[in-house]
Image (cartoon, coloured by chain):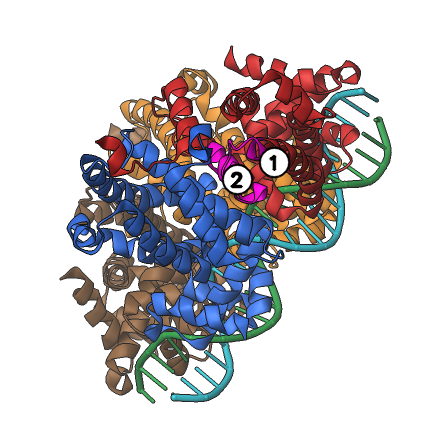
Chain colours: A orange, B brown, C blue, D red, E cyan, F green
Amino acid sequence: MEFNEWANEFFQIMDDEKMTEKQKKILLSSIEVFAEKGYSGSSTSEIAKKAGVAEGTIFRHYKTKKDLLLSIVAPVMAKFMAPFIIKDLHKIFDQEFDTYEGFLRELFLNRIEFIQKHIAVVKIMLQEIPFHPELKQQFSETVLQHVKEKLTGIIVHFQEKGELVELPPISIIRFTASSVFGFLVGRFILFPENEWDDEQVIEETIQMILYGVHRSEKIEE
Amino acid sequence: MEFNEWANEFFQIMDDEKMTEKQKKILLSSIEVFAEKGYSGSSTSEIAKKAGVAEGTIFRHYKTKKDLLLSIVAPVMAKFMAPFIIKDLHKIFDQEFDTYEGFLRELFLNRIEFIQKHIAVVKIMLQEIPFHPELKQQFSETVLQHVKEKLTGIIVHFQEKGELVELPPISIIRFTASSVFGFLVGRFILFPENEWDDEQVIEETIQMILYGVHRSEKIEE
Amino acid sequence: MEFNEWANEFFQIMDDEKMTEKQKKILLSSIEVFAEKGYSGSSTSEIAKKAGVAEGTIFRHYKTKKDLLLSIVAPVMAKFMAPFIIKDLHKIFDQEFDTYEGFLRELFLNRIEFIQKHIAVVKIMLQEIPFHPELKQQFSETVLQHVKEKLTGIIVHFQEKGELVELPPISIIRFTASSVFGFLVGRFILFPENEWDDEQVIEETIQMILYGVHRSEKIEE
Amino acid sequence: MEFNEWANEFFQIMDDEKMTEKQKKILLSSIEVFAEKGYSGSSTSEIAKKAGVAEGTIFRHYKTKKDLLLSIVAPVMAKFMAPFIIKDLHKIFDQEFDTYEGFLRELFLNRIEFIQKHIAVVKIMLQEIPFHPELKQQFSETVLQHVKEKLTGIIVHFQEKGELVELPPISIIRFTASSVFGFLVGRFILFPENEWDDEQVIEETIQMILYGVHRSEKIEE
DNA sequence: GATGAATGAGACTTCATTCAT
DNA sequence: TATGAATGAAGTCTCATTCAT
């Protein structure tokens, strides 16, 4: 069952040893409901009903509704960042990848897989960040800062090798991330019901990131 | 005053002849509040207070709270699309623009300017689309369909001229739109407080869309 | 009807011009319920039911339950103190009263009448002061300070005339107030159902305050 | 440690042989919490937390929250009354005390000491009696009745000796009790933080009870 | 005996909406 | 047209109490 699949994925991230069955059900229901209706549009009574628990049970485990939100988002955010937090990331990648393309492909595929697994929580995260200063700050500190720092190192490295265009690393990061997220938004949020040849589209996206969309007419000749 | 500036912009879009002063204030307050707290997180009483009208007055002009949301989003969405709806858009652009670059630059700059003017409403629109089927449908019909249709024509045109890479037009559209929106999200939503050299960053973005980020080492030589 | 009697008394104190009928009913119900069950033991739903209004109506007029409490207690507290706040109280009384006995009798009868009228609110006030720092402070500032200040002047005055025992005025005040309150507590709180010859008991109390309970055996002779 | 002091005092009153450590902690916590927030304003979970026991443990020892209240108040009430319940109290006192003053002083000092030791429970008792018919009845039967009966005898006795004013004994009791309680309320409830010369103030109070506050001007001469 | 997860009734409060003025 | 008092459903959260472990 699809539901169980991502439930399993999700609890691999949580410290689920200490959780009761009901608590787990509450978390999964919250994710479903928050993703569908947004945090403000969801009611704890609906979450409780969907989880098959009494409403009071939610508040035994999570002091407030907001606590529930943070309990969902925080660990996914943290886990998403894990690969970026390895020390000397760029050395490791340097050994493994001769080219930016290789690096980009690896990172892209790897993190996209993660996001796919946790798409509901990622959706919640992106939707709620603008309304919750704590989330915004957490996102800033946990995600942006590390990504910026680590990727800048790598980009500079490949720029020095003459393999990357000489634009501000931050611009390259934004551009790359946008392209990746653009794919994800289309794929999982706007048109999840369409048929997608994922492998193909990812390949195209990487190609466009690397070589853009332009062909000089001379080349054609 | 900044507030008045975008108020003016906004009412150029609305059919404001028939509106009372109070109605206008209600609209502007809604935009402020919805943008800050999201639709579900906003209360009509807060909007009324900010607009300086009685709570009941809102419902004299808009049957429901949702009506108010739609009244804000719909005209901006429509106006945003105006340039895309001109018949035979590709002929017009063909005459005016020899190159995709020219076309892209014109479109980019032009629509970015529009979005900047209406950033609050655009923010609301993007945030609320996932939760309101009507909005989603309206967005699909009004925006996506036309954009897809018109831009596909243009892209095919430039592909035939050998100027664009031979990838599915829809992929190119998504990629381009993502890059543009990535800039906007960073610029106006995530880090509006940073200093941005808009002209420079837009130029970089266009360049990356067109030529990607990669430099073959041969070229360097 | 007894209820209407003290309702009238109560609203002579409030600024009831701007109140709706429902708001008045809410206040009266609160007084009844708070006096019977205490603040914490009362529920807004019971108050609403007794007032014949929707529960939401309470919160249109009083932001919180505590607001309701303060709205009841504050004006009664203030009005109770009015006679003490007249400037140069002691001069006025000096002209009117040759003796401490005359003064005490006047004050006693006068304020007892007031308390009788507002016995329910006074009960609430005394019961809730220990649990609400704001109330305690308000009581301290509004009541105790003024009473202490004004009465001290008067007591010193009569001490100088040799009419009052040479004890610390504050002790005399406490003793006198205790005796008066002791009467009120017995009369209206502990045994309201007993038959009381008010005039007689008040007279006795005044006499005991003035002359104590002791008779030296010499006097008997 | 101050806390332990009154804990010891308290358990001298309880039948503490059969109590577990946890049960004792629960009682002490209840007293603290009830005294601070009132019965209705206290939650069993707070009491449990303060006692360092699980929420369920309270209900293992006390069937309901109210049971807990009664378990605290009843024994203190009973013990307070012990000296009044001795048979033929007035004979005993007659032998020991020639004068009402002696008797009053002894009683006053003795019972004040007791109240001081159990001030928290006395506070709870006084605050909750108005809201709990059982408590009120218990108070009536255990305290008022005995006090009234025994003291009436003694007062009549001293009236017959010509030592006490010829007023209804019940009035003298009320007056005396009020004066004593007035001192206690000021001392321990309203202004516990002030500096008090207890001995001095108690002496003054006894003096005022006996001889009142008035001095005829002739005496002065 | 002790625990603490679970409960569900009910607490306070908010809110979109109605309607008499 | 505009008001704002009134509503009652629904929201979040608390609480005394139960019960399996």
User: Which of the image's four quarters has the N terminus of chain B?
Assistant: bottom left
List the residue tagged with mark 2: D172
In the depicted structure, whether residue C171 falls above or below residue A46: above
Mark 2 on the same chain as mark 1: yes
SS for tag 1? helix
Q: Residue A172's spot in the image, x, y percent? A: 32, 37
Q: Neighbour class for label 1 at 10 Å: few (<14), some, many (≥20)?
A: some
The kind of residue tagged 2 is: Ile
Q: Which of marks 2 and 1 is nearer the N terminus?
A: 1
| Residue A149 in the image: above or below residue C20 | above
Q: Which chain carries label 1?
A: D
Of residues C96 and B129, the one drawn nearer to the viewer in this rendering? C96
Q: Was residue A52 drawn as part of the magenta stretch in this picture?
A: no
Q: Can residue D213 be seen in this view?
A: yes
Magenta highlight range: D158-181
Residue B152, given in percent of the width and then of the height, sits at: 42, 65
Q: Residue at x 53, y 40 (%)?
A: D172
Percent from the top left, x then y, of residue A106?
Answer: 50, 30
